[in-house]
Image (cartoon, rainbow, N blue to C red):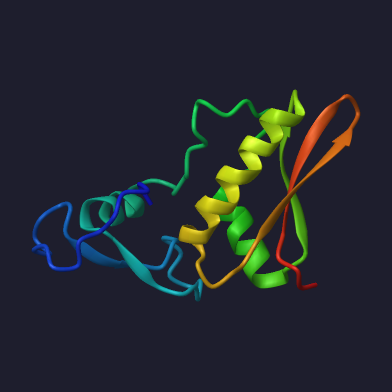
Amino acid sequence: MCDEPVDPDMSVNDPRGPSVDSRTADRKARLPERLAHRGCNTRKGAVKVVIAWPDRLHVAEPAPLITVAGRLERKGGREMVARCPTEQDAHEAADWLVDRFSRLVPDLPVTANVEAGGGQYLVILSTGRR
């Protein structure tokens, strides 16, 4: 959740220790589990999970990544996740997204494409399955 590595051998009583995370606080959702810091996982139950886009990326209307991950896992296909002012900005965002999704949903291979449209550049994630 915080994008920092989790040490599985650390004490589970430490806030940086390991706990099992299913990427959502919704108990009805059936998503694969993974390790998260106990402190991060505990906080998630009190607030809606949000993965922040880095400030260094120039994007307009960035999509909520947890929501995008859930939709792509369920339905596959492609989804527009951001608009960027320049092609270079869009490629930087696309590279970051592929890396971030490889850790967020490791069993879901995604690719990112950049398409020009309306004087801006769209960043589109695809799963390769429909």
Side (left or right) of 53 relative to 63: left
**What residue is at 72 percent from the left and 70 percent from the top?**
75
**What residue is at 51 percent from the left and 51 percent from the top?**
100
Q: Is residue 114 above or below residue 24?
A: above
**What residue is at 49 percent from the left and 73 percent from the top?**
31
Depth order, front residue of 15/42? 15
Estimate the x, y position of residue 3 in percent, counting from the top left: 37, 48
Side (left or right) of 105 relative to 79: left
Q: Is residue 85 above or below residue 116?
A: above
Estimate the x, y position of residue 37 in percent, counting from the top left: 25, 56
Camera sees residue 64: no
Estimate the x, y position of residue 85 in percent, counting from the top left: 75, 23
Furthest toward the right, the residue is 118
Quadrant assignment, res 121: top right
Depth order, front residue of 129/64? 129
**Quadrant (top left/top right/bottom left/bottom right) for the C terminus:** bottom right
